[in-house]
Image (tube, grey):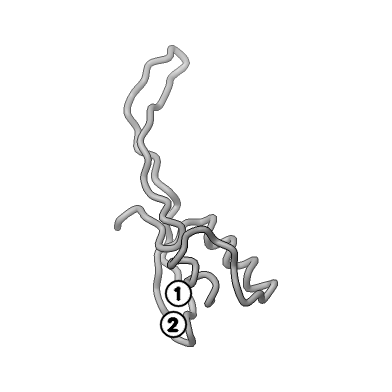
């Protein structure tokens, strides 16, 4: 599975694990990507979302606002339409 959120575009980043002795080893930080089934324009659709987008999606459903303010552009319609 590709580690990229379909909504916000969050993907894998690289860095170091740093021990107490300040030894640095390479490490890949991967987002918490999960497959989620959502409704878009009345059709059920399976998308890969990060945990933070899933939390935001739950908040949008509770408020029942017609539009969500995301800076992701075209992929914001996925969350807004749900």
Instruction: Residue 9: give x, y in percent of width and height.
Output: 41, 55
Q: Nearer the viewer, residue 35 or 6?
A: 6
- Is 40 drawn above or below residue 14 in the view shown? below
What residue do we see at 45% from left, 52% from top?
32
Is residue 8 left or right of 15 when viewed as pictured?
right
Is residue 79 left or right of 10 when viewed as pictured?
right
Q: Which residue is mark 2?
A: 44
Asked where in the image residue 63 lies, by quadrant, the reply is bottom right
Sequence-wise first label, 2 or 1: 1
Judged from this view, the residue extending furthest toward the left is 1
Check whether the beta carbons of the residues at disc 2 and disc 1 lie within 8 A of each other: yes
Instruction: Residue 12: give x, y in percent of width and height.
Output: 36, 45
Q: Which residue is mark 1?
A: 37
What residue do we see at 39% from left, 73% from top?
46
- Is 62 drawn above or below residue 28 in the view shown? below
Quadrant containing the N terminus in the rendered view? bottom left
């Amino acid at each position: 599975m590709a580690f990229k959120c379909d909504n916000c575009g969050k993907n894998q980043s690289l860095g170091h694990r740093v021990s107490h002795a300040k030894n640095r080893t390479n490490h890949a930080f991967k987002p918490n990507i999960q497959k989620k089934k959502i409704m878009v324009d009345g059709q059920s659709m399976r998308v890969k979302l990060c945990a933070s987008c899933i939390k935001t999606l739950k908040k949008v459903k509770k408020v029942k606002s017609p539009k969500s303010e995301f800076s992701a552009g075209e992929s914001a319609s996925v969350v807004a339409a749900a």
